[in-house]
């Protein structure tokens, strides 16, 4: 009986001891600052997640890997996880029970902004990219984030909507607010690029504006266009017509036609 009483008082004095037997749910958010290459090729299916409470770990998921990978930044080790260890949620999030344990598959090499390791017989490189801020060209974005080019290539716009945009006759300023570290932006912005490239209409003046980490810069652009991102904002004669926020369901080009017609 005394032993059980002692344990009872220990738990009252040190509730953290319960964590030994009770795993807490851990939330992770995708960080699109990382580009990923697997086997020497850009992997558009890859997602890199960081804990929302800023613990020194990363989880990599990819359709090219049979299971997720945990990178322990403190120990500089890589662990192969079971697929059941992570629960992927919508909106660039996943959930685990605490920090999941896995099979230690070795260390990683950090050189410049690249983290390289081998797992499942494949070479993996995670490339930390600097944030693009301010008014940037399409060419700058594609050079910075090559996966955008692949996503743009793989998006096929509706021909009927493109034909409408090709013949559209009103001058329209298109402002695309995005962030290179934003998971949703990497889905929307390549579609925007493909649509307006296909339309090839000089009536559309497309501007891409990158937002800094923290969302406070570029201050002048944010003051004019607001803090929505990703957002496609349409202006005519200096006045906002409408805006598309996030990566909406349905075809982007159809939404643009609905707004402009």
Image: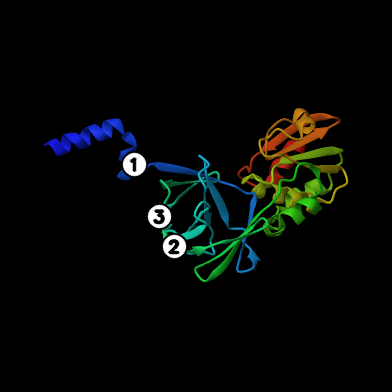
Residue 11: image location, x then y, percent? 27, 34
What's the distance in space between the residues labelled 1 and 3, CA to CA?
15 Å
Q: Are marks 1 and 3 in contact (CB under 8 Å)?
A: no
Neighbour tally class for label 2: few under 14, some 14-19, many 20 plus, Cα within 10 Å = some
Q: Where in the figure is residue 120, as x and y percent of width and height?
A: 49, 68
User: Quick check: marks 1 and 2 in contact, CB under 8 Å?
Assistant: no
Secondary-structure class at tag 2:
strand
The residue positioned 76% from the left and 28% from the top of the image is 223
Give percent across and percent down for residue 98.
41, 46
Badge 3 is on which residue? 101
Of all residues, the one furthest to the left in this rendering is 1
Q: Which residue is mark 1?
A: 19
Q: Please say if 96 is above or below 10.
A: below
Along the horizontal axis of the image, is 179 left or right of 12? right
On the rendered image, what quadrant is the N terminus found in? top left
The percent position of residue 46, horizontal first and vertical second, equals 58, 57
The residue shown at (54%, 47%) is 50
| Direction bottom: furthest residue | 121
Residue tagged 2: 104
* Mark 3 burial class by Cα count in 10 Å: few <14, some 14-19, many 20+: few
Which of the two residues, 210 or 166, is positioned nearer the viewer here?
210
Residues 148 and 194: in front is: 148
Secondary-structure class at tag 1 = helix
Question: How many numbered tags mark residues here?
Answer: 3
In the drawing, does residue 204 fall left or right of residue 3? right
The answer to whether 189 is drawn above or below residue 237 in the figure is: below
Asked if one can make out residue 261 in the rendered structure from this viewpoint, the answer is no
Please rate how many residues cluster around mark 1, counting C-alpha atoms within 10 Å: few if below 14, some from 14 to 19, many from 20.
few
Q: Quadrant of the C terminus?
A: top right
Earlier along the polypeptide chain: callout 1 or callout 3?
1
């Amino acid at each position: 009986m005394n032993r059980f009483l002692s344990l009872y008082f220990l738990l009252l004095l040190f509730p953290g001891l319960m964590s030994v037997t009770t795993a807490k749910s851990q939330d992770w958010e995708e960080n699109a600052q990382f580009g990923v290459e697997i086997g020497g090729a850009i992997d558009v299916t890859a997602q890199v997640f960081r804990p929302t409470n800023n613990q020194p770990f990363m989880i990599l998921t990819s359709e090219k890997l049979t299971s997720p990978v945990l990178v322990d930044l403190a120990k500089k080790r890589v662990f192969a996880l079971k697929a059941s260890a992570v629960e992927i949620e919508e909106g660039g999030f996943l959930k685990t029970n605490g920090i999941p344990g896995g099979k230690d598959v070795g260390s990683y090499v950090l050189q410049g902004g690249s983290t390289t390791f081998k797992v499942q017989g494949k070479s993996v490189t995670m490339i930390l990219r600097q944030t693009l801020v301010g008014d940037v060209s399409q060419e700058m974005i594609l050079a910075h984030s090559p996966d955008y080019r692949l996503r743009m290539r793989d998006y096929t716009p509706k021909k009927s909507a493109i034909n409408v945009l090709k013949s559209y006759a009103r001058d329209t300023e298109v402002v695309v607010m995005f962030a290179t570290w934003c998971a949703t932006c990497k889905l929307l912005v390549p579609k925007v690029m493909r649509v307006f490239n296909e339309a090839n209409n000089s009536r559309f003046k497309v501007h891409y504006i990158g937002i800094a980490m923290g969302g406070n810069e570029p201050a002048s652009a944010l003051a004019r266009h607001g803090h929505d991102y990703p957002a496609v904002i349409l202006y005519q004669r200096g006045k906002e017509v409408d805006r598309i926020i996030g990566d909406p369901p349905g075809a982007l080009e159809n939404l643009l036609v609905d707004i402009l017609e």
